[in-house]
Amino acid sequence: MIDNFKTIERSSLVDRVEANLIELLKQKKLKVGDSIPTELELTEKLNVSRTVIREALMRLRMMGLIESKKKKGSVITSPDLFGNMDKSMNPHILSDETLREIFEIRLVLEIGMADVLFHRITKEDIAILYEIVNDEPPTTQNHIFNIDHEVAFHGKLYDITGNKTLKKFQKMLLPVFDYVHNSGLLKKKAIIKKFISHKQLVQILEKGTPEEFRNGMRNHLENHFNRLFDLNS
């Protein structure tokens, strides 16, 4: 019983030291490549044992905030923002509420990417998009989602943005989107309406405006919004 209490107390101490270390790094305004204080300096600054400091530093390394360099000790590094998130982005272990919110995030992202797309899209990109949509079925009231079409078309849109972080995020979102679509979490009684197809979206990208694309993408995703919020009722 006493041992259990000691473990909890130690864990709590490391948690506090970890938080203090992160705050200390913020205060010093350290940049990527800058060395952080040594273990001894941190021990004296935070008034805790070196063992606790080492454990807290290990957590920062696991988070990708610091790394060890020869002759420099521990230095600030640029963390992989989605590294840990990717490992936990398993739809089977996420709550229904979280799954629905992730589903919503993707809808919001794709409506909001219009201006970036129009700023960076090329004639070559347009040609590739037409090739992608060439084998897709026409707009229909019964077909609202095909994982292969989604990966190819929407993946290319994220690629066109040139935003590597956004593209990584999309790769994590898509499997969850697919899972939620087929899981029964959404309202399945929504009346499926005709929507703007991928091919029509390409036509807007070729000859339209960002505003037209936003409206077109909103229409393209209409049935998903219907299933989320039961807009037909």
Image: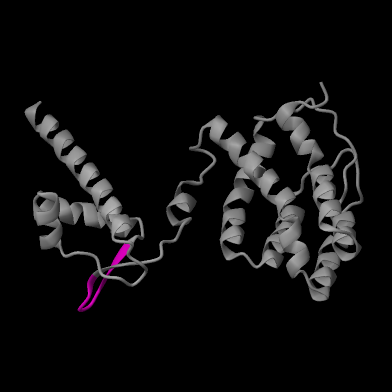
Q: Residue at x 54, y 35 (%)?
A: 98
Relative horizontal placement of residue 211, taking residue 164 as reference (left or right): right
Could you say where residue 21 lies in the image, as x and y percent from the top left?
25, 53
Residue range (magenta): 66-73
The main secondary structure of the magenta stretch is strand
Could you say where residue 141 lies in the image, as x and y percent from the top left?
90, 38
Could you say where residue 97 lies in the image, as x and y percent from the top left?
56, 31
Q: Residue at x 83, y 69 (%)?
A: 126
- Seen from the viewer's position, the closer of residues 4 and 164 is 164
- Seen from the viewer's position, the closer of residues 60 and 95 is 60
Relative horizontal placement of residue 149, taking residue 5 as reference (left or right): right
Q: Residue at x 37, y 69 (%)?
A: 32
9, above or below 90, in the image:
above
- Seen from the viewer's position, the closer of residues 45 and 157 is 45
Q: Quadrant of the C terminus?
A: top right
- Whether residue 152 is visible: no
